[in-house]
Amino acid sequence: NGLPESLSEKPQVVIDPFKQASALKGQVVIPTALPGLESEGTFFRADGLPFDVRTVEAWRDHGYPTVQNVLANLIAEGH
C-alpha cells in the first residue's frame, strides 16, 4: 500500500477529494472539496514556493468541507 512497514498495519484515514485506489483502501474516507477549484487558499508547489488560488465560482457550492476545515475539526475533537 506504499506505507512504511511500521504504519502498514495501522488504521488508515484518507482525506481526499477523489475516489481513487488510495482512498478506497482507507478504513475511513472523508471526501473534501477539490483544492484550487472548490476551495481557495495558499498552496505550496513541490519546491516549497507558495501561491494563492481562488475558487472557481461555478464550483463554489459543492457541499464538501475543505481539507483545512476537516483537519481543524479533527484537531478540535482530539482525534
Image: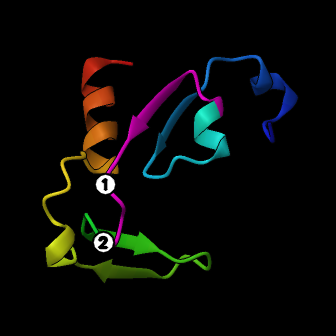
The part of the chain drawn in magenta is 25-36
SS of the residue at dot 1?
A: loop
Mark 2 sits on what residue?
37
In this rendering, position of residue 23 left or right of residue 52: right
How packed mark 1 is, by other alpha carbons closer than 10 Å (few <14, some 14-19, many 20 or more), is: many
Residue 65 is one of the magenta-drawn residues: no
Callout 2, which amino acid? Answer: Leu
The quadrant in which residue 3 appears is top right
Specify the farthest residue to the right.
5
SS of the residue at dot 2?
A: loop
Q: Which residue is drawn at 60% across and 48% down?
A: 20
Question: Camera-side residue: 53 or 77?
Answer: 53
Callout 1, which amino acid? Answer: Ala
Mark 1 sits on what residue?
33
In this rendering, position of residue 29 left or right of residue 34: right
Q: Residue at x 15, y 65 (%)?
A: 60
Q: Quadrant of the C terminus?
A: top left
Q: Where is residue 73 in the image (x, y as percent from the top left)?
A: 25, 31
Q: Which colour scheme is used?
A: rainbow
Q: Where is residue 25 in the image (x, y as percent from the top left)?
A: 66, 31
Q: Position of residue 8 (x, y in %)?
A: 78, 25
The quadrant in which residue 65 appears is top left
Question: Camera-side residue: 67 or 38?
Answer: 38
Q: Are marks 2 and 1 in contact (CB under 8 Å)?
A: yes
